[in-house]
Amino acid sequence: MDWKALVLLLLYSHAQATASHRWSRAKFFPAAHRPKKSSSMPLNPVLQTSLEEVELLYQFLLAELEISPDLDISIRDEELASWRKALKFHTVCNDVIPKRIPDIRRLSASLTSYPGILKKEDFERTLLTLAYTAYRTALSQGYQKDIWAQSLLSLFQALRHDLMRSSGPGVSP
């Protein structure tokens, strides 16, 4: 094979890999990459970039959350809700994570078939979706409770599987 053809082939394959990576970044949470006219938050908001922010996220989840009839999630504690990071939390919870059963099932299916380890922001959003699903499971009754519980279990298994993969090759999921 001519060296020019080989270089061209390498450049083409690199361009393919770069382009497909760029467009596949929104695989799990496409809403994180779509701008909202009503929001001043940046694209792809991430809550936890340091240990302090992980602890703050934990505080938000432990605080009493409220879900309105239109599925808007808010923090009841006014002091916590006034923090700058609470605005990002509000944006991720209300504009990024899925809240309807079909969307949550689609996310679970995508996570189950994903061969790699989740990026930090995808793991974070999946965990928030799991928390939301647990909350909805607790509020539901009858057949609806069974549907939400199945979705909760699917998300939990997907996260567990991801954690097992990321802990090393010697551990089987």
Image (tube, rainbow, N blue to C red):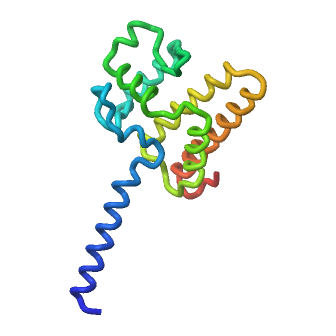
State the residue in front, 156 or 102.
102
The residue depicted at 61 percent of the width and 22 percent of the height is 135
- Residue 10: image x %, image y %? 29, 76
Q: Is residue 106 left or right of residue 118?
A: right
Quick one: which residue is furthest to the right in this view?
142
For the N terminus, the quadrant is bottom left
- Residue 86: image x %, image y %? 38, 19
The residue depicted at 72 percent of the width and 27 percent of the height is 144
The residue depicted at 61 percent of the width and 41 percent of the height is 105
- Residue 8: image x %, image y %? 25, 79
- Determine which quarter of the picture holds residue 96: top left
Q: How many marks?
A: 0
Q: Is residue 88 left or right of residue 161?
A: left
Q: Is residue 168 above or below residue 31?
A: below
- Residue 150: image x %, image y %? 70, 36
Q: Is residue 61 above or below residue 173?
A: above
State the residue in front, 86 or 99.
99
The residue depicted at 52 percent of the width and 17 percent of the height is 62
Quick one: which residue is furthest to the top in this view?
78
Quick one: which residue is furthest to the left in this view?
4
